[in-house]
C-alpha cells in the first residue's frame, strides 16, 4: 500500500484526482495539463519497481506478426489507428526513458500513445499492470511502432480494461454494454504476462478486457500464461467479456506463439478466451499454444476442469467467430478442441472459416467428428467452411503460398519474400496468359531482387494493391503489346515509371531483357528452349541466384542470341534440358561462345533436380526450397523470381510427389519448403508428404 502521507501530498479525494496538476518528466512527454490520477499511478509503479530495465529486444528470437501468406482485405474498423499525432509519447529517445511507470501513467490518461525509445528495439519490464481508467478518454491506442516489447516478467498481467470495475470508475449504468473506452493495441509485442495471481478477474495473462471495444492489430504474444486449472478460466494471452452491442473483437495480422517454445498457455484457450463475445480473426497465426487444465467444463468428477481450446476457447449464447486467411498449427487441448473450442449454449451462434489452414492441432479427449482440432456446438452443428484446409496431421515444415488464381498467387509470393517495400525498387510485369515473354524476366527479377507480377486484359485489383504496397521506382513490362496491352501499361504508369522490354519474338525478348540488366560481360549464361516453360523456369531460379541471364533457343541458334552471347563473353554456358528440347547441333554452336554443360533429366521434373544439384551441391548451399506444379507455368514463374532472389531452387511436382523429388528435398534438408499454388495444382496429399 502507499504511505498515506504520500497520498495526502496529492490531495486524492474519494479516489478522484485533481486534473489541473502539471507534471513534466523525461520518461513520459505529454501536454502540460495532466491528470493527477496519472501522477499517482506513476508513483505506485515507481514504488513497486525496485529495479526496471529497458533492454534491446532480440527480435530474431521471435517470429513476425501475422500469417505470412495472409492477404485478406481488412475492414476499415479493423485496421490500425493513425498515430501520427499522438496525445502522449512514452520515452525521450533513449531505452532507459521507456519505463514501466511511464507506460502505466500513459495508459491511465488514455488517448493515442506512442513510444520514443531510440532507434533499436526495446523490451520494457513491467512492474505494475497498466490499467485503463474508463472516464479518462474515450479511446486508448497503444502503438509500439513494431519495436516495443512489454514484458510481464512472468509475474503480472500487462494490460487491463474493465468498464464494470468500480476502481477504474463506472461511467454508465450499463457497464456491460457501453461504447467506450475503445482500446486498441497495435505494433506491440507482449511476453511473459502472468495472471495466475488474479482471482477476481482471472484469465488473460497479457490482456484482460471487459466492455467498450477492443482490437489487436499487427501484434505478437509469446509465453503469456493464466491459471493452470479451472473449467471456465481462459486466455493465456487475452481474455475478453461484454463488447458493445455484441460487436466483434478484431485480431488482425497478429501472431500467438509462432514457433515451438513461444506459445501461450492457460487452463482453457491457450491464446484467446471469452464468454459471449464475437471475434473476427484476419491474416493471423496461432501455433504452439496449449492448455493445462483437464476434465473439461463442467468439470468431470475428480478433476479440476478445463483443457478446452488449445488456441481459442469461446463460450456463450449468441456470438460469432470468423477466421479469415489465418493459420493454426501445433496447438493442443488436453480436453476438446485442439485448435478451437466453440460452444453456443443456445445453438444460435455460428463459426465461419474462410481461406484458412488448420493442421496438427490434437485434442486429447474429444472433438467434433470430421473436423480434427475442433469442438463446436453451433446453429449449423459444424463450422461453415469456405476454401479452408483442415488436417489431422501437421505437414512438417511446408508452407503453402496460394491465391484464388494465378494473379493472387504471384502477389502472395511477393508479400512472402519482399516483406520490406523499402528494399524493392523494381517490379516486373508479365502476362498471365502465356509463358514465352516471361521466361527471361524471372531470372532478371531474381538478380535484381524484384517480384514478377502477372496481368491479364486488365490490371487485377490485388496486383494494383501490391504495387501500392511496394512503391516501385521502375516497372518493367516484359513482352509486346500483344502480351501486355497498352491499356494495362498505361494503368501501371500510375504506380511507377514503366519501361517495356520486348522483341519481335520470344527469343529476341529474352535478348532485350539480358541487354537491359546484364550490361557487361558475365561468367555464366543459361540456355533453355523457348517452346515450353518447365526447363526455363527451373533455370531462371538458378540464373537469378548466380546473376546470370536466361536466353531462349528454338530448333536453331538465332542471330540475336548469337550476338548476345558474343557480347556477354560467358565462361560457362549451362544448357538446360535434354537433346529433344535443345539439340546437339545447337549445343555445338553454343560451344563456340563458351564451355557448355548440359543439365538434363529424363523429364521436366528430373531436369529441375539436375539444375538444383548443380547449383546447390550441398545442404549448406540453401535453407529454402520452392515446389511448384510442372503442369502449368504461372505459379512456377513467380516462384522462380523470388527463389532466385533468396538463393533457392525450384523443384517441379506432378499429381504425386515422385521419389526423385522427395529425395532431392531430403538431400537439401531445407528449413523451409514453400509449396506454390492451391490444392487444385499441388494436392494436400502431396503437400503433407513434403
Image (cartoon, rainbow, N blue to C red):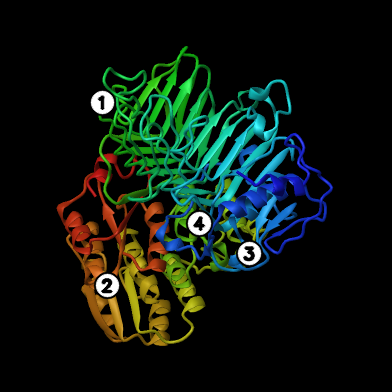
Q: How many angstroms separate mark 1 from mark 4 (CA)?
A: 47 Å
Q: Tag 2's secondary structure?
A: helix
Of pointers 1 and 2, the one earlier in the residue sequence = 1
Task: Give the labeled residue for mark 1.
Answer: 365
Q: Which mark is residue 615?
A: 2
Q: Secondary structure at mark 1?
A: loop
Asked which secondary structure carries label 4, the reply is strand
**Residue 109 vs residue 451, the one in the foreground:** 109
Q: Earlier in the sequence, mark 3 or mark 4?
A: 3
Instruction: Say which mark, if any, is on residue 97.
Output: 3
Expressed as whole percent of the image width and height from the top left, the position of residue 439 reads: 41, 64
Between circles 2 and 4, the one closer to the viewer is 2
| Sequence-earlier tag: 1 or 3 | 3
Q: Quadrant of the N terminus?
A: top right
Which residue corresponds to mark 4?
453
Mark 1 or 4, closer to the camera: 1
Describe residue 248's horizontal placement relative to residue 28 as left or right: left
Mark 4, other Cα within 10 Å: few <14 / some 14–19 / many ≥20:
many
Amino acid at each position: 500500500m502507499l504511505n498515506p502521507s504520500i497520498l495526502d501530498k496529492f490531495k486524492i479525494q474519494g479516489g478522484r484526482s485533481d486534473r489541473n496538476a502539471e507534471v513534466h518528466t523525461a520518461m513520459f512527454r505529454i501536454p502540460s495539463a495532466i491528470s493527477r490520477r496519472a501522477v499517482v499511478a506513476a508513483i505506485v509503479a515507481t514504488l513497486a519497481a525496485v529495479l526496471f530495465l529497458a533492454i534491446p529486444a532480440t527480435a530474431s528470437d521471435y517470429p513476425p506478426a501475422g500469417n505470412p501468406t495472409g492477404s485478406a482485405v481488412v475492414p476499415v474498423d479493423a485496421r490500425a489507428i493513425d498515430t501520427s499525432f499522438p496525445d502522449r509519447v512514452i520515452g525521450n529517445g533513449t531505452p532507459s526513458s521507456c519505463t514501466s511507470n511511464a507506460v502505466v501513467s500513459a495508459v491511465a490518461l488514455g488517448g493515442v500513445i506512442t513510444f520514443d525509445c531510440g532507434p533499436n528495439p526495446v523490451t520494457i519490464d513491467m512492474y505494475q499492470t497498466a490499467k485503463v481508467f474508463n472516464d479518462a478518454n474515450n479511446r486508448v491506442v497503444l502503438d509500439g511502432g513494431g519495436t516495443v516489447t512489454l514484458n510481464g516478467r512472468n509475474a503480472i498481467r500487462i494490460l487491463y480494461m474493465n468498464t464494470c470495475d468500480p476502481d477504474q470508475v463506472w461511467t454508465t449504468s450499463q457497464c456491460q454494454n457501453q461504447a467506450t473506452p475503445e482500446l486498441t493495441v497495435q505494433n506491440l509485442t507482449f511476453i511473459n504476462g502472468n495472471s495466475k495471481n488474479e482471482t477476481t478477474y482471472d484469465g488473460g495473462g497479457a490482456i484482460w478486457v471487459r466492455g467498450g471495444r477492443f482490437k489487436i492489430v499487427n501484434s505478437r504474444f509469446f509465453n503469456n500464461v493464466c491459471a493452470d486449472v479451472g473449467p471456465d478460466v481462459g486466455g493465456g494471452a487475452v481474455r475478453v467479456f461484454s463488447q458493445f452491442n455484441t460487436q466483434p473483437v478484431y485480431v488482425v495480422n497478429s501472431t500467438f506463439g509462432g514457433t515451438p517454445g513461444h506459445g501461450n498457455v492457460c487452463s482453457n484457450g491457450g491464446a484467446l478466451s471469452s464468454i459471449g463475445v464475437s471475434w473476427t480473426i484476419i491474416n493471423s497465426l496461432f501455433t504452439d499454444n496449449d492448455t493445462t487444465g483437464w476434465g473439461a467444463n463442467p468439470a468431470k468428477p475428480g478433476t479440476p476442469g478445463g483443457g478446452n481450446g488449445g488456441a481459442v476457447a469461446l463460450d456463450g449464447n449468441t456470438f460469432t467467430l470468423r477466421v479469415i486467411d489465418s493459420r493454426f498449427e501445433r496447438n493442443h487441448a488436453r480436453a476438446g478442441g485442439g485448435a478451437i473450442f466453440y460452444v453456443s449454449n443456445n445453438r444460435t451462434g455460428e463459426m465461419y472459416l474462410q481461406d484458412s489452414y488448420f493442421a496438427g492441432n490434437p485434442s486429447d479427449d474429444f472433438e467434433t467428428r470430421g473436423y480434427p482440432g475442433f469442438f463446436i456446438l453451433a446453429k449449423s452443428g459444424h463450422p461453415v467452411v469456405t476454401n479452408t484446409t483442415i488436417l489431422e496431421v501437421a505437414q512438417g515444415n511446408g508452407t503453402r503460398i496460394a491465391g484464388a488464381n494465378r494473379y493472387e498467387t504471384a502477389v502472395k509470393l511477393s508479400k512472402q519474400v519482399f516483406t520490406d517495400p523499402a528494399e524493392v525498387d523494381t517490379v516486373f510485369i508479365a502476362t498471365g496468359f502465356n509463358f514465352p515473354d516471361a521466361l527471361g524476366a524471372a531470372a532478371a527479377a531474381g538478380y535484381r531482387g524484384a517480384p514478377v507480377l502477372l496481368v491479364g486484359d486488365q490490371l487485377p485489383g490485388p496486383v494494383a494493391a501490391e504495387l501500392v504496397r511496394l512503391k516501385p521506382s521502375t516497372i518493367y513490362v516484359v513482352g509486346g503489346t500483344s502480351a501486355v496491352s497498352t491499356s494495362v501499361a498505361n494503368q501501371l504508369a500510375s504506380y511507377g515509371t514503366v519501361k517495356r522490354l520486348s522483341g519481335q519474338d520470344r527469343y529476341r525478348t529474352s535478348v532485350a531483357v539480358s541487354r537491359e540488366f546484364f550490361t557487361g560481360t558475365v561468367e555464366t549464361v543459361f540456355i533453355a528452349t523457348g517452346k515450353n516453360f518447365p526447363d526455363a523456369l527451373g533455370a531462371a531460379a538458378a540464373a537469378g541466384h548466380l546473376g546470370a541471364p536466361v536466353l531462349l533457343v528454338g530448333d536453331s541458334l538465332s542471330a540475336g542470341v548469337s550476338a548476345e552471347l558474343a557480347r556477354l563473353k560467358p565462361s560457362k554456358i549451362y544448357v538446360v534440358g535434354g537433346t529433344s528440347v535443345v539439340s546437339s547441333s545447337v549445343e555445338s554452336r553454343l560451344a563456340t561462345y563458351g564451355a557448355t554443360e548440359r543439365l538434363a533429366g529424363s523429364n521436366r521434373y528430373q531436369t529441375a533436380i539436375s539444375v538444383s544439384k548443380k547449383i546447390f551441391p550441398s545442404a549448406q548451399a540453401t535453407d529454402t526450397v520452392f515446389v511448384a506444379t510442372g503442369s502449368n507455368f504461372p505459379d512456377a514463374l513467380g516462384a522462380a523470381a523470388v527463389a532466385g532472389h533468396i538463393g533457392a531452387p525450384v523443384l517441379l511436382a506432378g499429381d504425386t510427389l515422385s521419389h526423385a523429388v522427395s529425395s532431392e528435398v531430403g538431400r537439401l534438408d531445407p528449413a523451409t519448403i514453400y509449396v506454390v499454388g492451391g490444392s487444385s495444382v499441388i494436392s494436400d496429399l502431396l503437400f503433407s508428404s513434403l
